[in-house]
Image: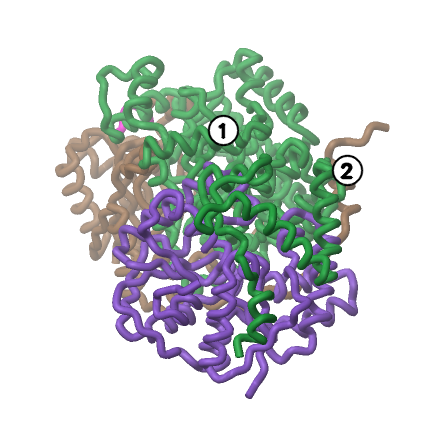
Chain colours: A brown, B green, C purple
Amino acid sequence: MVQSAKDEILGRLRAAPKETLPPRPYLPPLSELSLGKDELISKFTEILTGETGVVHRVKNNREALDKLTQVVKEEKLKCVMATTDSVIAPLNLPGWGKEQAVNVLTPKDFADRDSFKDAVFDQVQAGITGADYAFAESGTLAVIHNKDQARLVSLAPILHIAILPSDRIVSVYEPIIEKVFSNKDELPSQFVFISGPSMTADIQGHLFKGMHGPRKVIVILIG
Amino acid sequence: MQIKTEEFAELAKREVAKSRAYPSLKNAPNMLYTKRMVGMKTLPDVAAYQAYGAAIRAEALNRLPELLEEFEKNAVANGAKVVWSRNAKEADEYIVNLAKERGAKFVIKGKSMVTEEIGLNDTLNDQGIVPWETDLGEFIAQQMQRPPFHIVAPAINLTCEEICEVFMKQVDMKERTLDPVALGLAARLFLREKFHRASFGVAGVNVAVAETGTTINLENEGNIRFTKSSPRTLVLVMSIEKVVPTMKDAMHIVRLLSRNCTGQRLPAYVSMDSGPKRTGEIDGPDEMIIVIVDNGRSKLYQDTRAREALRCIRCAACLNTCPVYRQIGGYSYGWVYSGPMGQVLMPLLLGLDRTQHLYRATTLCGACKSVCPAGIDHPKLFLYYRSMDVSGAPYFKGKKRPSGEGRFFKAWSMALTHAWLWNLGVRLARNVINKFAADGVISKLPGGTFAGWFEKRDLPAIAKKTFRERWKETKGGN
Amino acid sequence: MKDVSLFIPCTVDLFLPHVGEATAFLLRRAGVKPIYHQAQTCCGQPAMNSGYTQQAKKAAKHFIDLFGDDEAVVSPSGSCTCMVKYHYPEILSDEPEWFGRATELAPRVYELSQYLVDVLKVEDLGATFNGKVAYHESCHILRGLGISEQPQKLISAVKGAQLVPMNQADFCCGFGGEFSVHYPDISESMVQDKIKNFIESNADILLLCEPGCLLNISGYLSRNLPGKKVMHLASFLASNGREER
């Protein structure tokens, strides 16, 4: 019987000698672990702003919508797409959009991938999403993708607006990783860390934002 | 990709001359080297964090078969399909046949060194399927038909003039420009269409996690996220050594990779995929196939010393710190991988006989070893390969050295253990060599053995009285 | 007075004996008595670097037999010191008795500046020099042995001397033994960068602690820029920067 590639490869690997390795060395903890809530917010803001992200802090959902209204005026937005996650859904953005003369689409408006892609690539000027967590350690938004959180909404439009409660900001990745990946039967199909706008320095080392993804990231922190 | 490792000497000579003419070529590694230093400072203890990374990679390699099995089991449970390929041919054939079955006329590609190793783009092209590299640097290199100059920044050496020329012809750019931002925008517009219409995507894997069957990609541009979100079929290609035990281990590697590579705490995007999309999701792949590529690695794995080369996480810190790489750039190394990591890996994959220069064109300065987050001792591996040439070790195709060299070292080792013989040798050498000295300086010696030295430098004549002779005469200078 | 055993690299013995004599001179100044085993020849590095491990082992065993009982072995070379301290145990790892002897000897082998500053606790050797000097951090000295402060302390203690910073002081000069012979264009490019950085530092003399680097840089200067000076730190200190040969 012909051996499968898998058996051949694993067979060779298993037949190889094993080494006795020393135990792993001591790893000093990250300094961010000791930050209090306000420090977490300010460190998160400092680092993300350093990457040209814009961070606004508001008291509640009403103020979040006011801030959104302000952004729409500043960025001259006529058509946006919003996901339907646990932060965004309660805001009723389609309703708000009618008041602001902004066309608010959601992925659920589309029957299939292709029509959704047409809209998110060519029609909308901004994507509005929530974020499940954020990390002070690196000024990072963490987004779980699922049926209420389409992937392309925070990627294809030139502007990404993320809204989240400020108490979702934690210090370092590990506790969240543990939480998100704790149940092997319920892993998210994709979990993304966003630490600023899309960028590149591939041409002569010249850095610029907005290579393939958003050129600008605006975060609205609630609370 | 064509293998030109045997042309190293000529390629390097040409590149040295070029970098003399265009000193800005040295800027790229220098810029990344400087950024790295800044990024590393954000860690509480650089040495401890690097050492921990090395321990993770050492353990991952040591447990490789179990971890790969665990990875496969969990990836399949997530809904991914896992395909194993012994070599480039098997991997290429599988991917191309799948693309044909799916009716793909073109595929979008995220950056993947292993797909260059297996020559996937050529095979796709041969079968009439157009591969579009979407990482800006890879896209430019592809359009200009150049190999990668650097494993992380493949087109960093190319000028705006060169890029503009190519973009005018091939990328529908309407107006000439030398502004890197405008050039980038032209690429963005061109590739956006591809992202939008793609039905088949191929990407690499930075880290594969055994514990959960998750694959992780790091990027700044967003092209990999597009590749993993827009098309219905996604193929992820990984070589066998990419696996680590746990998600916690993966996070540590991600922290080290980001800082060592570009000095960032994190790149703009880190995306972690655990299988294809789930029911009800409107984007993401319907099917995800993970192709695990061996291509000579399980063979080299048998040697516990050589195995260390597989620890590499592709951060390119070694390239940016290598004084030789700075002078010769990525083309000189003749195949996919360049710099010290290429110098330790390619001889094992291609055979020592085809890669003689790769582990000899080094001063063993140790700069690479000193920055490596995976704890690879590059100089030690170079010496190991050289010793395999001397012993003619067949396993890695050691190439026997010229017999004169062997005879020389045999005589030399006899002389150095018998001082009278050594002293005689020194006196004879002095009599001969110093004939060519003028004013205590030798500018040339007959015979080609040391021609390389004298081409560029002088040498002092052998001292009329060596240290040993002077000590004896002056009774120790007393 | 304590005896200290001189480990004089073959490059110094043949081409740079004044560096060896300066080493002995400085050790005397620092209050120890240098002794010299006449039967010493070569540490074996050329053989190891060319892959001739068996021949390198012969050199190692000869060295260990010769120096094995010395309380302290001191060398004006980083690469030779590295060879004995770190590579001898490696290449002898398959011969337990020799491995034991090599490991036992290793801590007693020192590079010169390390021995003066860390063991003898001497930094001022009475040298004077009016002018600027720059320091090249040779690969085996810096990365192989972790030595960087010690030579700079010795330099800073020289009356009148000003140690100036030099760009990329820790970059390889392009010697690498065989490398400089077999890859002359790359090697030349590297030594040119080193010299460019030296000139830009405005130092009068470039100092270093490695005979190989010295032969490489001085050889290039001799051919191309005879006015610029490079010296081994030992010669500099022993001759107040005038380097009598």
Q: Chain of mark 1?
A: B
Horizontal and vertical percent for residue B69?
69, 44
Horizontal and vertical percent for residue A112?
43, 24
Q: Which residue is mark 2?
A: B394
* Amino acid residing under circle 2: Pro
Viewer-nearest residue: A21 or A150? A21
Asked if residue B458 lies left or right of residue C71, the reply is left
* For the residues bearing labels 2 and 1, Cβ distance under 8 angstroms: no
Kindly state the secondary structure of the residue where label 1 is placed. helix
Whether residue A56 is visible here, answered yes or no, is yes
Residue B344, disc: none
What residue sits 45% from the left and 36% below the top?
A: B328
Q: Is residue B98 magenta?
A: no
Q: Which residue is mark 1?
A: B11
Marks 2/1 same chain: yes
Whether residue A146 is visible here, answered yes or no, is no
Viewer-nearest residue: C153 or B183? C153
Horizontal and vertical percent for residue A202?
35, 34
Viewer-nearest residue: B449 or A68? B449
Q: Nearer the viewer, mark 2 or mark 1?
A: 1
The residue at the far right in this view is A1
Horizontal and vertical percent for residue B394?
77, 37
Q: Main secondary structure of the magenta part?
A: helix
What residue sits 72% from the left and 56% below the top?
A: B415
Q: Quadrant of residue A214?
A: top left
The residue at the far top in this view is B128
Q: Which residues are magenta?
A: A120-124
What residue sits 40% from the left and 20% below the top?
A: B144
The residue carrying pointer 1 sits among few (fewer than 14), some (14 to 19) or many (20 or more) residues within 10 Å by Cα, namely: some
